[in-house]
């Protein structure tokens, strides 16, 4: 037993020992968290519903009944309250309890009504203890009375069982933490890559302030949040903000990119799998629900989940429990769900591609992230932020972000949203070599925002006013003088007139010569 590093095979080995004894069958009960309180028939007798005894292993010798699956002595759903009946009393007291019948009557025992059917006349209940802590109990059932020497051997056996269980649990915890750290490291690397593409919640626009207010409202609750928006708008950053402002902030934030998971691996990705569950399952693997235990699970592109998996996901959200692929053990899911999509899930529901009940389960608190074209006021802040990040990450000299460059950015519709802005700035930082930034934006009739004509240049469509050539030249000259005065007649460099106009200094000097413009004396 001491060689076992996992609890399940250890428990099977313990109850298998019944085949070499005079006991008819044996059981192992362990103290675990209360998990079936709503359906447990012993709930009225249970004083402390936070803990109870779980039947974790049972094995019989020639003790099978047709039509009963599982047999009553090996039912994994069996529960007994602490301090209830002989088993609960023995565990609470930490002392051996032996129950025997007189004559040829079968044993009657609270919580074990099936003993009469099996003709059991004697039951030994030996508490399992390790370092002063009661872990549960070993039970042995016999159809005949057993020698008193069995009680001495029962104590010795229970001591070995207690040490072996503690040892197996310690190994499992170490393996679980190791696996969780490996997965978290992998997911963190994904998150870093994604965060670089999206930046942070930067800006002062009314649209962004509205999102922040929504985040503050929902963050400290346990409500599911559905984050909606176009690709590249920063939906994952909203999920990060919700998690970091929540009561689960000390737990993990685990992301699943549902669009990148192969269809046949969804269930394993979500819930994990046991060794040998399918071809290629060479070892046990924790799923992302298990990795996010006590924290937050972010389902990015949730609209990509296949219908058959949606049903299983809904069950976990409703019942807070799941099983690994190829494993019977039920695990509790203490996880908060955040989801994001660029699809219209209402249309997906109407088309039969998304479950309506899952949609309503996820859509408890929807947050709509606006596209960048509706946040033009945030472009100066975002551009400055991305310039600093790009210069640091790429180890480039920090370039100058001019007002002309910002105006150029604000004149574009950004179909790729913040992700496109980040990529464009990163490329421009490399090309700038520490000088002024120049953006190579695509020019198409669909994406370029046409500037509105000024009030001077237009009066009405019915009576258009045109500038003559002399008027046009005079306006150009006046504008040049205004820019030079605003720059205090500085031609080049930071905040120079050339930079403000978005032209080269040589071009500016050429125009000044053309119009005969010179810096005033004094």
Image: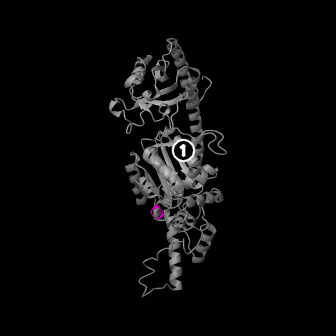
Instruction: From the viewer's side, name the closer residue of 432 and 3.
Output: 3
Q: Residue shown at 37%/26% (left/top)? A: 84
Query: In this orientation, does residue 204 appear?
Result: no
Provide residue 382's location: percent of width, then percent of height: 51, 57
Q: Is residue 42 left or right of residue 128?
A: left
Residue 89: within the magenta?
Answer: no
Query: Residue 505: which quarter of the image?
Result: bottom right
* The magenta segment: 344-348
Q: Considering only vertical position in the picture, is 123 above or below 220? A: above
Q: How is the image coloured?
A: one colour
Task: State whether the magenta stretch is mostly helix, strand or loop.
Answer: helix
Instruction: From the viewer's side, name the closer residue of 307 and 460.
Output: 307
Instruction: From the viewer's side, name the closer residue of 434 and 102.
Output: 102
Provide residue 226's location: percent of width, then percent of height: 45, 54
Provide residue 172's location: percent of width, then percent of height: 57, 31
Query: Residue 170: which quarter of the image?
Result: top right
Q: Residue furthest front?
A: 104
Residue 346: within the magenta?
Answer: yes
Q: Residue shown at 59%/50% (left/top)? A: 193
Q: Return the residue at label 1.
A: 271
Provide the secondary structure element on which disc 1 rests: helix
Q: Residue shown at 53%/76% (left/top)? A: 477
Q: Give the crowd class for mark 1: few <14, some 14-19, many >=20 residues within 10 Å.
A: many
Query: In this orientation, does residue 137 appear?
Result: yes
Q: Residue furthest bottom?
A: 462
Quadrant (top left, top right, bottom left, bottom right) of the N terminus: top right
Q: Considering only vertical position in the picture, is 509 above or below 14? A: below
Provide residue 203's location: percent of width, then percent of height: 46, 56
Q: Considering only vertical position in the picture, is 231 above or below 62? A: below
């Amino acid at each position: 037993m001491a060689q076992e590093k996992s609890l399940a095979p250890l428990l099977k080995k313990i109850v298998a020992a019944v085949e070499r004894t005079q006991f008819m069958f044996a059981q192992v009960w362990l103290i675990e968290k209360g998990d079936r309180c709503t359906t447990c028939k012993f709930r009225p007798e249970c004083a402390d519903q936070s803990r109870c005894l779980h039947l974790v292993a049972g094995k019989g010798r020639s003790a099978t009944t047709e039509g009963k699956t599982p047999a009553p002595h090996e039912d994994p759903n069996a529960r007994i309250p602490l301090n209830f009946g002989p088993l609960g009393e023995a565990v609470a007291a930490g002392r051996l309890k032996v129950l025997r019948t007189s004559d040829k009557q079968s044993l009657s025992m609270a919580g074990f009504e099936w003993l009469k059917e099996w003709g059991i006349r004697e039951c030994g209940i030996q508490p399992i203890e390790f370092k002063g802590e009661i872990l549960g109990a070993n039970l042995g059932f016999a159809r005949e009375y057993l020698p008193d020497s069995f009680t001495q051997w029962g104590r010795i056996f229970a001591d070995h069982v207690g040490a072996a269980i503690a040892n197996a649990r310690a190994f499992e915890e170490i393996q679980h933490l190791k696996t969780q750290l490996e997965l978290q490291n992998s997911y963190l690397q994904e998150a870093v890559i994604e965060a670089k593409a999206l930046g942070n919640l930067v800006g002062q626009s009314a649209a962004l302030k509205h999102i922040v207010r929504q985040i503050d409202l929902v963050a400290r609750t346990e409500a599911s949040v559905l984050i909606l928006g176009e690709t590249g708008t920063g939906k994952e950053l909203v999920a990060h903000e919700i998690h970091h402002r929540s009561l689960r902030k000390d737990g993990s934030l685990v992301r699943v990119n549902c669009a990148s998971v192969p269809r046949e691996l969804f269930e394993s990705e979500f819930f994990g799998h046991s060794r040998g569950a399918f071809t290629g399952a060479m070892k046990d693997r924790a799923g992302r629900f298990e990795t996010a235990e006590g924290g937050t699970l972010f389902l990015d592109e949730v609209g990509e989940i296949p219908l058959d998996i949606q049903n299983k996901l809904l069950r976990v959200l409703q019942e807070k429990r799941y099983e690994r692929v190829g494993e019977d053990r039920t695990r509790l899911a203490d996880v908060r769900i955040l989801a994001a999509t660029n699809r219209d899930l209402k249309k997906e529901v109407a088309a039969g591609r998304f479950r309506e009940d899952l949609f309503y389960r996820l859509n408890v608190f929807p947050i709509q992230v606006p596209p960048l074209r509706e946040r033009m006021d945030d472009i100066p802040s975002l551009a400055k932020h991305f310039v600093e990040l790009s210069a640091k990450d790429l180890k480039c000299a920090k370039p100058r972000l001019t007002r002309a460059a910002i105006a150029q950015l604000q004149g574009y519709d950004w179909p790729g949203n913040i992700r496109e802005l980040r990529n464009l700035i990163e490329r421009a930082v490399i090309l700038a070599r520490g000088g002024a930034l120049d953006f190579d934006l695509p020019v198409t009739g669909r994406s370029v925002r046409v500037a509105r004509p000024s009030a001077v240049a237009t009066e009405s469509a019915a009576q258009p006013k045109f500038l003559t050539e002399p008027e046009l030249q005079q306006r150009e000259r006046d504008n040049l003088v205004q820019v030079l005065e605003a720059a205090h007649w500085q031609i080049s460099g930071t905040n120079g007139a050339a930079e403000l106009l978005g032209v080269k200094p040589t071009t500016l000097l050429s125009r000044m010569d053309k119009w005969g413009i010179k810096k005033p004396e004094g």
